[in-house]
Structure formats: structure tokens, C-alpha cells
Image: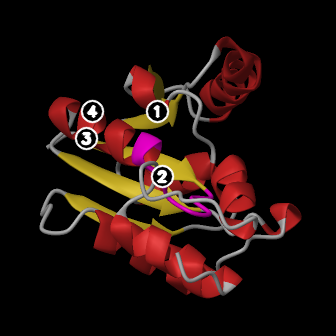
Amino acid sequence: MKRAIYPGSFDPVTFGHIDVIGRALRLFDEVIVAVAPSEGKSPLFPMAERLDLIRASVPGETRLSVKQFDGLLVDFVKEEKAAAVIRGLRAVSDFEFEFQMALMNRRLAPDVETIFLMPKEDYSYISSRIVKEVARLGGDVSGVVPAPVAEALRHKFGKAR
């Protein structure tokens, strides 16, 4: 059974993330969405809520699990006996950072591959940061995030939209 890890902060999960998850599930028998605490980013949603929002956004997918991880990604990958790390690339600007991370992970764990997947073009401009800003200002984000996330953002920012 081939297992892959899709790591990130997912604060919040977007349709771009969901698209990458779907692509990864076509390539692997099982995908683990690994949610990092990302304290340096001052997350909007606490860890438990991010985990729940991801689960609620991909209901009924039995080959997907959602877990929290702390520490080095390669250590988590080894613990979970995964063969690969999935990374989403939206634009060329993402590549340099992701490439550096992939090379460092390869140095730390030569047997773990990194696979870059691009989301559907419709989602290439979406980032969690932009989604949070639009929601904070009262904009409608329902077209770029799953319904449970849109509702959580409305609740978080007190918007009636």
C-alpha cells in the first residue's frame, strides 16, 4: 500500500488544497493530511478546528486521514511509513521555497520522495492568507473554500454573509 503525506498549516483549507488532495488520492492508496501547528504564522483557527474543517470538507473519503504533526516532517513521514510527500505548487513563485525544502528533506530522508502537484487553474491564485483577508473584510469566499470553512470564517469574523 502506497501512502503519501500532504503537509501544511491549512489555516483554513481551500478548494486548492482539496483539489491537490484529490489528485494525490488518484496517485496513492492512502493520503494523510498532516497539519502543522505553524505558531509563527499566528493561525486564525486553533489546531483542533483546522483538523475538523479538513475532515468536514472531504466527507466520506476512506483513504484520507487527517493528523497533527510536530517536529520534522521527515520524522512524521517515517513514523507513518509513507513513501512520498505531496506539495502543492500554485505559481512559479512557490517553486524556489518548495524546491529548497524538498532538497533538505531528501538530505534528511533519501528514501522519501517529494511530489509536486498543481491545483486546477481556477484555484492557482487562492491562498489561505488571501481567503482570510477577504473574509475579514466581509467578502464572499464561498467560491474558494468548502461550505464548512466559509461558515467557520463567517462565524470567526461575525459576518452575516
Give x and y (percent) for residue 39. Answer: 81, 69
Residue, disc 3: 22
Give the residue type at disc 2: Thr
Would you place residue 41 above or below residue 113 in this image? Answer: below
Give x and y (percent) for residue 30. Answer: 21, 49
Q: Residue at x 66, y 87 (%)?
A: 158
Q: Disc 1 and disc 2: Cα gap in Å?
A: 9 Å
Residue, disc 4: 23
Left or right of 11 on screen, residue 1: left
Give 90 or 78, whichever is nearer the viewer: 90
Residue, disc 1: 123
The reply to whether the C-beta atoms of the residues labelled 4 and 3 are less than 8 Å apart is yes
Give 109 or 2, whichever is nearer the viewer: 2
Quarter of the image for residue 35 reads bottom right
Residue 14: assigned label: 2
Give the residue type at disc 4: Arg
Task: From the image, state whether disc 3 or disc 2 is nearer to you.
Answer: 2
Please state the extent of the stretch shown in magenta in the rendering.
9-16
Task: From the image, state whether disc 2 or disc 4 is nearer to you.
Answer: 2
